[in-house]
Amino acid sequence: MIEHKVRVYRSEERLAREDQLAWKIAAVASDPVEVTPEVTEMVINRVIDNAGVAAASLNRGPVIAARDQALRHTPPSGRAGATVFGLAPGTRVSPEWAAWANGVAVRELDFHDTFLAAEYSHPGDNIPPILAAAQHVGLGGAELLRGIATGYEIQVALVRGISLHTHKIDHIAHLGPSAAAGLGTLLGLPTETIYQAVGQALHTTTTTRQSRKGEISSWKAYAPAFAGKIAIEAVDRAMRGEGAPSPIYEGEDGVIAWLLDGPRAQYVVGLPGPGEPKRGILDTYTKEHSAEYQSQALIDLARRLGPRLGADLATVRSIVIHTSHHTHHVIGSGANDPQKYDPTASRETLDHSIPYIFAVALQDLDWHHERSYSPERATRPDTVELWPKITTVEDPEWTRRYHATDPAQKAFGGRVVVTLAEGSVVEDEIAVADAHPLGARPFGRAEYVAKFRRLAAGVLTTEKQDRFLDAAVRLPELGAGELGALTFVPAGPLPTRSADGLF
């Protein structure tokens, strides 16, 4: 691993291309290193994970709209096009629109993988655009594996090294470059071409975090799909010889100077050296529960704490969750968003409200991707009574552990202090979610498959589930043109959008 120092350069300093971060990312992407067996296994796990979440979201409004948009864009003559979740494998659309539709389906339930460090991310968002491009040009499983491994590697490196949220920039600004790099690996493009695509993708996917603040809308699901779509378009332009702003990260008027830490900024981004395997995916983790990742451990803690408190939670006077800066300020009471305590708030808002999530998990001793967010559940009188009693506070120790580099120290949980009406106190804490690699029940292949079947139940027949899983586990063996097997068609008809758009 090489630690690359990144800073802003004045125009007269003339930073050489080879010394720019975008070029170094492109050099990693163009390095023809083989994918290790353990990375191969984890890529398969995440392909399964994405598909399960997508299956469960097929009938949701944002997914219906994105799918309908994609159907308006057929592939050009001479190209295979790409599949869309829910549609027959023979129904093909242009790859950027397949990335769009499938990206929304994967992201809609906030239920796939995560990586948290200086920034936040869902690295599984790299898979839809890379898979779509692979199907479109008729590549096989070996090329797809290499592309996905690069997407994860670059995503993890950027998330470790550069904070976006500090400056209210949305995390898709790391996804555009990582997806472009993954596409470059997939297609075997030269470093120069990938460099231009990475720069274009960064320039066009730098947006604000308002998509995850206040009244959160369906755009939260669309934003990563947008980055994947833009990455494909950036690669297409770069392949045609079109360039990008340069240096995009380090320039005097570049992203770092004006949108991040400013002209005096100093970052360190660690990237694999030549010939070094891409192992970043192994540091990422998935979700057992359909909610923001920082709530995963706290849902598990609520399920454990509930029986200790008994059935009558009306005796609870207050619940204070001592946790990290991020949890407190993004999904906790420190966000100062009244919507996080509103029973009529959108699903997207509720899945970023730890007071709501903790209240429901404490009462139900369970979490479900649909039932736990239903209007009937959110407006239940005993929940509406308990919910405002739950607040968060930032604890420096939990913030330190959130940013720790030692895996044994890194934690995304918190300490919960419950004060009852008669004054007694019940306390408990949890460091990582049960499904985390260091948790009580770490996810392995069996758990990924079980999650897929649980989410696909009632949507896909058992035979169709088996067919998809068989293709996924054989990913390294799939030949040219066989990646169309990595999709599925539901048992019943899909709903269509009632309102027409422009397309």
Image (spheres, rainbow, N blue to C red):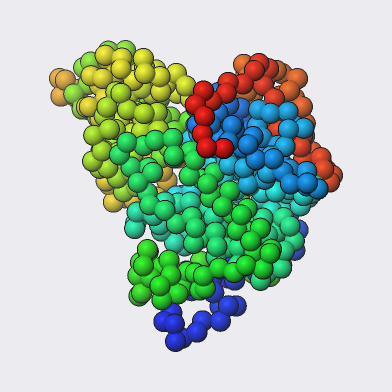
Horizontal side of 327 relative to 180 (left or right) equals left
Horizontal side of 182 relative to 483 (left or right) equals left
Q: Is residue 472 visible?
A: no
Quarter occupied by the N terminus: bottom right
Please identify the quarter of the rendering in which residue 162 is found.
bottom left
Please identify the quarter of the rendering in which residue 373 is found.
top left
**Residue 159 x/y as whole percent:** 48, 56
Quarter occupied by the C terminus: top right
Judge whether 94 appears above or below 91 on screen: below
**Residue 435 x/y as whole percent:** 53, 35
Q: Residue furthest front?
A: 502
**Residue 410 x/y as whole percent:** 44, 50
Please identify the quarter of the rendering in which residue 297 is found.
top left
Q: Is residue 465 visible?
A: yes
Q: Residue furthest bottom?
A: 12
Which residue is depicted at the point 66% across and 58% down? 236
Residue 479 vs residue 41, the one in the foreground: 479
Which residue is depicted at the point 33% across and 42% down? 213
Residue 386 vs residue 304, the one in the foreground: 386
Which residue is depicted at the point 43% across and 79% down? 9
Residue 411 vs residue 141, the one in the foreground: 141
Judge whether 393 appears above or below 348 on screen: below
Q: How many marks?
A: 0
**Residue 387 x/y as whole percent:** 26, 25
Which residue is depicted at the point 32% across and 36% down? 215
